[in-house]
Amino acid sequence: MTLANRSAARGVLASTLFALSTTGAFAQTAAENGFANAVNDPPPGYSGPVFELSHDYPAEHPGDCGPDDCPWLSIDVDFTTGVPLDWDDPDSNWNAYIMSMLDVAIRGQDPNFSNEAGFNTAPNGYPEWFHVPWMAYDPSAGREFAHGTTNERTAHLSDFVGSPMPNATPLTAMSNDCQAQFPHGFESWAVGVYNAWGGYAIGQAFPEDGMPALTQWGGQVVPRGLPFPDGTMVAKFLTTNATPDCVQYLEGSSVWMVNRHAYSDSTGYTCERALQETRLTQVDVAVIDPRSPTRWVYGTFGYSGNAEGDTVLERLVPLGLQWGSDPKTFPAVPRALSVPATESVLNLGIVPDVIEYEHWGCEGRLAGPVDNPVSSCLSCHASSFAAANGAIPVMGTNVPPSFGFSGICAAGGSAQNAAYFSNYNFPQAYPDAAYAGAVPLDTSLQLAVAFTQYATFANNGAPNACTNPNQF
């Protein structure tokens, strides 16, 4: 398809799939909503940090990613061994690989990740990190005004200190008082950023009018700018309202004040928001690496006050890497046909001395401390799709269920598990015919939020009202 034809296709697709009005006011309203900083403004007299959306996306492709910005590409690793891997193998470079990712993600940041500093998108005086638009539209989980964090999965004490799951061992340190104090779990609030290569793609997918720009690739409707180009990196910083009294290894972590959900003893978290403490607990990083069978490599870190290091960022502990969803491993196949996972490598040596406990993901796949233990990093992200024909996405109905489904990590060989734990590359369709026509988003759950909120705006003209912010 020529550039001119692609441009024409983009115009046709955008008007066909997402049109609500042809007036200029509609486009301006989309821009105002899409590029808003937060769900609501700081209250009068507030003197703390105020989040500003970084959306001055690069207008041109940044070019090749050199060793300063993509050091992992020059580290010798093998993603195709086909055998279970040992993090501590002296001939491997897994630790060097993931630490090179972290070094880029935190370069120029406050080493203690303080509330006053937050995450700086322009550590050298010009934008280097960029945010996805349309994540301040949803009043339930949308961006708050202090640090731009959004509400993610609610974790429970068992996620941090043990549970009776097959891949976990309960710790005697589990506090009955904490369990009683937080029966509705701990909220996770996170902020994610893309580097210049990823920011270029986001700006192509969501130009200045705030409306998705779509084109076609091999007969598949896709966002303009995708797939994310070589050089792309995304980092996400996750916080929790769990306290060191409940989770000992959070001692000494950075404490942010974010405008998150207020708590009620009777109903749990409520739609009302208030400035409250939250602590850094997890950092996720993901990069494009052409050597990976899925093009992506995901890594995750957990904070531990027991780790060596004088600063918060020095006490981030690498937990593991993942570059595939292990489609030959249970539950993608029945137990009798399953082989051990070979597309994740886990830093098993950090438990229990440094981080005390880590639940990992389904059947030896990677997942972080506040992630769903019956899922995995890549299989969750790989299910990022927008609904066909501009419909409002509903997970499990017109887009894949990213955050779990009945029988996940249990019903071996089921169609849902086989699809969820499969490996496929953009722009392939999701390998479940139930979601035919869904628009692939190249593993970006943030883009999935953006498309969901834009579709809500385009179809309803207003966001869905907050009713129950408890996310399980």
Image (cartoon, helix red, strand yellow):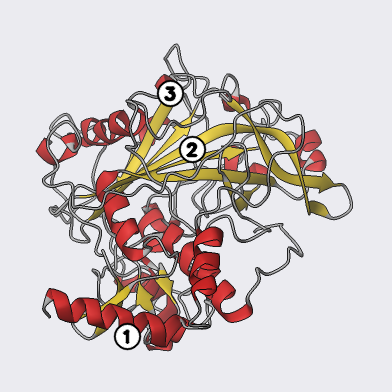
Q: Amino acid at mark 2?
A: Gln
Classify residue 442 as left or right of residue 374. left
Q: Position of residue 197 (x, y in %)?
A: 24, 49
Residue neighbourhood size for the residue with mark 3, other residues' Cα within 10 Å, grouped as few (<14), some (14–19), many (≥20) = many
The residue that label 3 is drawn on is: 313
- Give the Cα separation between the discs numbered 3 and 1: 47 Å
SS under mark 2: strand
Question: Which of pointers 3 and 2 lies earlier in the amino acid sequence?
Answer: 2
Q: Position of residue 382 (x, y in %)?
A: 36, 64
Q: Quadrant of residue 299?
A: top left
Q: Residue 12: which numbered mark, if any? A: 1
Q: Amino acid at mark 1?
A: Val
On screen, 407 above or below 136?
A: below
On screen, 165 above or below 196?
A: below
SS under mark 1: helix
Identify the residue shown where x is 19% and y is 47%.
231
Q: Residue 444: which numbered mark, if any? A: none
Identify the residue shown where x is 60% and y is 30%.
49
The residue that label 2 is drawn on is: 282
- Give the Cα separation between the discs numbered 1 and 2: 42 Å
Between label 1 and label 2, give the one nearer the viewer.
1
On screen, 383 above or below 150?
A: below
